[in-house]
Amino acid sequence: MSPAYSITFAVLGIRPEPYAVTPTLSARIGIAALSEEPVHAIALRAQVRIDPNRRSYTDEEGAGLTDLFGPRERWSDTQRSFLWMHCATMVPGFTSGGTEVDLPMLCTYDLEVAGSKYLHALRDGTVPLSFLFSGTVFIRGATGFAVQQVPWDRDDRFDMPVSVWRDLMAAHFPDSGWVRLSRETLDALSAFKSGRGLLGYDQAVRDLLAAGGA
């Protein structure tokens, strides 16, 4: 088996991708190849994890995180790093020892997803992220191309401002959010809305909340 190629990765920044059809963040990744050997390409993959125990939370944020972690007295046991997403990109070849590339991060605002639920609860500060990199490096070989694997221990941490997430969601879902409902519940809500001549689902839900004393 060929030895792992000597290469490192660093997350330089994260920003909303302004022209994406679906909510997408763009992580700027710095890549350094610790070798004189030119790199023809890298099939780069990354597992992005959220590390909730790397920051503190206000009482308001804590209330929004109860579904994920339970009451605060249990957080020392329940606040564990969890997967947010997998992402990938192709890195063009380079010869100067290093390069930078944008890594697309496709996001969802589905509040049934743990990552979205966590991010929705945050009001300020940063989102503690860990990037675990992997992939395949294509370099020159004796008879053409040679293939090397990105070492398994290549990772980096990045604290993304909460405002980056909020700006992304505001661009795609201005002043709104998404809640997934079963078909049966959606049919019942539609019937309630139509039966009372309401203009939208927002008003139907508000009427139901008011009737329930919420």
Image (cartoon, rainbow, N blue to C red):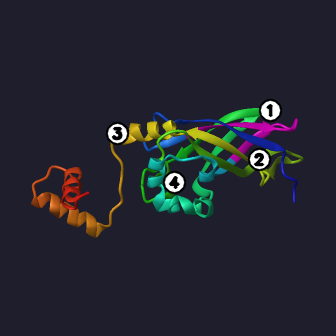
Tell me the distance, in whole angstroms, between the alpha carbons under discs 2 and 4.
Answer: 30 Å
* SS assignment for the magenta stretch, majority: strand
- Which residue was labeled with disc 2? 137
Q: Amino acid at mark 2?
A: Val
Q: Are marks 2 and 4 in contact (CB under 8 Å)?
A: no
Question: Marks 2 and 4: which is nearer the front?
Answer: 4
Instruction: Pinpoint residue 156: horizontal percent, then vertical percent.
Output: 71, 45
Residue wearing tag 3: 174
Placement of the N terminus among the 4 image quadrants: bottom right
- Which mark is drawn over residue 115? 4
What's the CA distance linking mark 2 and mark 3? 41 Å
Indicate whether 126 appears above or below 70: above
Q: Secondary structure at mark 3?
A: loop
Q: Earlier in the sequence, mark 4 or mark 3?
A: 4
- Tell which circle, 1 or 2, labels the residue nearer the N-terminal end: 1
Q: Is the residue marked by circle 4 packed among few (<14), some (14-19), or many (20+) residues within 10 Å?
A: many
Q: Residues within 10 Å of mark 3 (few under 14, many from 20)?
A: few
Helix, strand or loop status at disc 4: helix
Name which residue type carries label 4: Gly
Judge whether 141 appears above or below 97 on screen: below
Residue 119: say if magenta.
Answer: no
Point 49% across, 36% down: residue: 163
Q: Residue at x 22, y 65 (%)?
A: 187
Give the residue at x 13% y 58%.
Answer: 194
User: Which quadrant holds the C terminus?
Assistant: bottom left
Mark 4 vs 3: CB contact within 8 A: no
Q: Nearer the viewer, mark 1 or mark 3?
A: 3
